[in-house]
Image: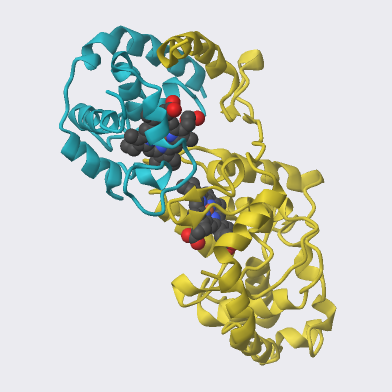
Chain colours: A cyan, B yellow
Amino acid sequence: MKIGNVGAFSLALVLAALPAVVLAAGNAENGKKIVETKSLGNCVACHVIPNMEFPGDVGPDLVQSMQGFTEKDRGTVWQWVWDARVFDPDTIMPPFGPNKFMTKKDVDDVVEYLYSFKKNK
Amino acid sequence: MSKFIVRIMILPACALFVFSACAVRTPSAGGKASAPVITEYTPNISTQEYEKRYQAVYGKFTEQMAAEGNPADFVVDDGKDLFSKVQGSAGKSCASCHGANGEKLKGVAAMYPKYDPAIKGIDTVALQINRCRKDHMGAPELKYESDPQLALELYVKSLSNGVPIHVSIDGPAKPFYEAGKEYYYKRFGQFNFSCALCHVKYAGHMIRANLLSNNRHHTDHFPTYRLDWSGVGSLQKRFRGCNKNVRQEPLPFQSETYRNLELYLTYQGNGVPIQVPGFRM
């Protein structure tokens, strides 16, 4: 398997693409729906999300995680949701973008919703 | 240092990591295609911690089921009846060869799955029962997962209750074990999950309201009663269930890959006593 090369290659692509995605503004309400719905993002299967019962604990608490991201990090957060393999090649997070769970617009919306978790915006 | 800067610093490190951290790699030494090298995961919580979590999530349920009894005990009785029933052109029953109460099969199931030179592959209890029927009894093979098939398998396994699993992966079994491991660690399906990711690396974590089970105890209790099935099912039915849950293509019962997988997984439970029928949610 040549995962290694592909990973490094897409990393380069991502770095080139960051400024473009940083500017996108999403619809937080649609993002919330994706994050909470089993057949869509189902992020709550693995992450703590506000006001959702029985969240999983496979991934970090996203309310806490979001406190550490600044406005400048929107591109990074976007990439985590689109394809987390760039940060951790052995991640359990499904590649939501490449495997066609979500469109780019959907990811914009999810990121918008995630930013609403920030306590001191 | 802000989190953003930390991340930027991590990125180049990740690029290096990409070359070393993948669970499944194929060495390209000599330019020839060869078996992938699999780096097995270390679970990210200890066995003790896992057991504490299991108790917290399922403790009440296991107490209740112990008090109420296992509905699958009746299936074991059906299996015992079938065991001594004459079927097929040779005029024999299983008991004709293996003893009226299956005494010659005590402890035998604890060594399954195992390599069998006759099929040049891995033999399971289910497969062996059908081969006995066909070759020694002249009786039709039983459809996998049918009531009589499960009943016979369950009865034969129950003759090894309390005996620690001790399957061998030496000699000719080794490549089949490796193939089972390869499937267990392979990422596929829309979610890009592998069995090992959930059942080794994250075993003991909660995926929504489900506890990710630890694979050391995946094979000791099958065939098991399962509330969700309202009935008895085999280990391979569970494989198919997990495949479907994570949107992977399930494979046919007793296919070569599932038999290899069964060998791999059963070996992970070596030393654990067989306890059938199990009882699960």
> Residue B243 placed where, x, y %?
45, 52
> Residue B58's quadrant in the figure?
bottom right
For the residue pair B44 and B136, the one nearer the viewer reads as B44
**Which residue is located at x 33 percent, y 29 percent?**
A81
**Which residue is located at x 33 percent, y 43 percent?**
A50
Placement of B83 over or under B108, stated as above or below: below
Task: Note whether residue B2 is visible.
Answer: yes
Placement of B104 over or under B114, stated as above or below: below
> Residue B125 placed where, x, y %?
68, 68
> Residue B141's quadrant in the figure?
bottom right
Placement of B275 over or under A42, stated as above or below: below
> Residue A40 placed where, x, y %?
27, 44
Task: Note whether residue B224 is visible.
Answer: no
Residue B47 appears left or right of A31: right
Placement of A118 over or under B125, stated as above or below: above
For the residue pair B260 and B30, the one nearer the viewer reads as B260
> Residue B280's quadrant in the figure?
bottom right
Tag count: 0
> Residue B224 placed where, x, y %?
59, 72
**Which residue is located at x 42 percent, y 32 percent?**
A64
Residue A27 appears left or right of B37: left
